[in-house]
Amino acid sequence: MEGNVSEISFQTAFAKLLIDGEARAAVAAGSAPGSFEISEADAARLRAIDQGRMGLYADLLVMNRLAKAVEALPCTTKALGEHLWPLTLAWNHASPPVQARKYDEAMAFGNYLLETIGSRSYEPTYLKDVLLYEMTRLELRYTTVHEPPAAQAERCPALLEELARGEGYTRVYPERAPHTRVLALDHDVQPIMEELVQGRVPTEVEPRLTYALMAVDRGGRVQPFAVNLPTAAFISAATGEASFAEVLTWLAQVFQEETPEQIQALGAGLAGLCAALVEQGVILLSDHPASRGVEPALN
Amino acid sequence: MNADGKRSVTLDEIPFLGVGLGFRQDLKGAMLSNAHRIDFLELVTDQYMDKPPFKEEEAKALAEQFPLVMHGVDLSIGTDGPVDREYVGKMQKVAAWSRARWVSDHLCFTRVPGVSIGNLTPLAFTEEAAAVAIRNTREVMAAFDVPFLLENISYYFRVPPSRLSEAEFIQCVIRESGCYMLLDLANVQNNAINNGYDPFAFLNQMPLDRVVQIHLAGGYYHQGILLDTHSHRVPTDVLDLLAHVAPRLPNLKAVMIERDQEFPPIEELLEELDQVREVLASRWTPLHGRPAVTRPSGAERGGGVPSAPRAPAG
């Protein structure tokens, strides 16, 4: 049993067995695990472990994974109610742990839920919106690169002044800051999440189309804002590849503003909105397309 | 000097910290408003790795109010492979932000390439596994100019072929690597119950002169197994172990309670700290004659500048 096998081969087999109940049962029964290769020496060592205790430990590992998901996606996991544990077991089987970080585990669980929720109808109906909201918040919090583009930011005031005068529409390129997201949701999730945080699961919630803007401040905290459709549309169109004039044209079509007077008023409104969003760090302005050779385009 | 040319910290130079708590976000406000009753805090290193800037700011701010030590959970010192240098680099950053008096992790493995177990998993108690842990521990120690401690873990089964006893295994790794020990007395109690041995006899076999810090915690029984959950008061059994072992630890600098779940009101935790101080009052020389509440505020200590390392009173 002791042989000359390396400890890493044993540790790898041991780790794989701990996260795979079927493999554990197979090895205990003297069979090959199926999902990976294992030497007879390692299998003999693993069979010699107290199988009941190893099973208990494996259950604890699943609970540890779930604890990370609950901490990072508290409202989603609360809303899941009695579905939570069966879904956790299914997720653990479908998606074994590769990274121990809370972010990785929670995103893996969230992505599994998105697939599962997409293929079945889950109650409550707002579940998907709450999940998207929490996953977006988590992603921004953990993946934002905290290096503000200072040079671009410094050019913003002059460009804003131009826009305020009704000038420079064709040479100013608004771009959504990389650490911002706009979500279109079928429910107003803020009051729903306030209830969930208190441990209450709202049951009868009417659908209501809402837009949520999330931005990361310089300390790395995610700040959520409820925004209206024009604001959401402007931020979404601000790709850095289209000029302010092109964004204006597109939004005028969307909102069916057709006369020159209407378009002029919309332009002035967007210039004001742009100033507010620049102030919040949501939009950056530059005097050249950020497309790195790609033609400005709006689809 | 260690391999990197850094001077190794001697036991006499490791600062005395007293009786403290593990820092937890849920208790942050309560801990800050009761800073005068908590001698030091232990931060979980991994909770400050790959995090937004405000976590770095939090660590720095806490370092202004408390002496800090760092405690990691995913170094995986027992994995038979190269030390994860990227992870060690992150540990170094966090230790620098927090001006950590020392850093610690566990004598176990938590991952292998491609699989993260996500929990502290026992090693086989063999000479071969000990050699791996010794090699990796020496490499980690060389990366720090503060002491590095290894903690004994809770485990629910022995990994064959464990030719050594657990105590022999720990002794071997701590002595041969030259690191210091974080002795978790709750883990000793759990293992004694779950694996059927005498905790007092076990403690007598520990490298007691290398113990710098003690962990205390409480768990609960599940299916007849005492789980290491850090969810309950420190039980009397564990305090008895503390009373037994404390007088035999000439280099003990810090004792702390870990609480990770079922957080009670802060007053209950502070009372537990006072209870620990009472147990130690006649058994731990640095506490002789000290009142239960001793730590001056950050401002009184000169804005949280680390105190000069000093030897314990006896």
Image: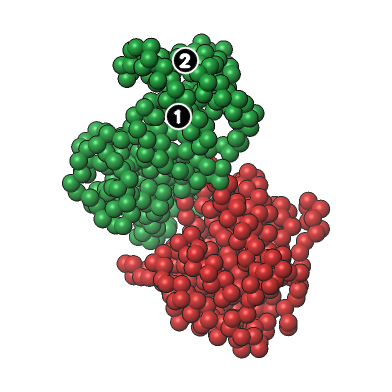
Please give the label number shown on residue A91: none
Chain in green?
A
Q: Element under label 2?
A: helix
Please indicate whether residue A124 sits to the left or right of residue B207 in the image: left
Question: How many other residues sit within 10 Å of disc 1, few (<14), some (14-19) or many (≥20)?
Answer: some
Q: Where is mark 2, residue-wise?
A: A245
| Nearer to us in this view, B112 or B181 | B181
Farthest residue toward the left? A204
Mark 1 or 2, nearer chain start = 2
Q: Is residue B30 visible?
A: yes
| Nearer to us in this view, A247 or B293 | A247
Residue A33 pos. (x, y %)? 38, 42
Q: Residue at x 76, y 64 (%)?
A: B9
- Tell me which amino acid carries mark 2: Ala
Q: Residue at x 34, y 12 (%)?
A: A259
Please give the label number shown on residue A273: 1
Please indicate whether residue B240 sits to the left or right of residue B12 in the image: left
Q: CA distance from mark 1 to mark 2?
A: 14 Å
Residue B57 pos. (x, y %)? 60, 52
User: How does the figure colour the protein chain or chains?
Assistant: by chain
Residue B152 pos. (x, y %)? 55, 65
Q: Residue at x 44, y 53 (%)?
A: A46
| Nearer to us in this view, A59 or B217 | B217
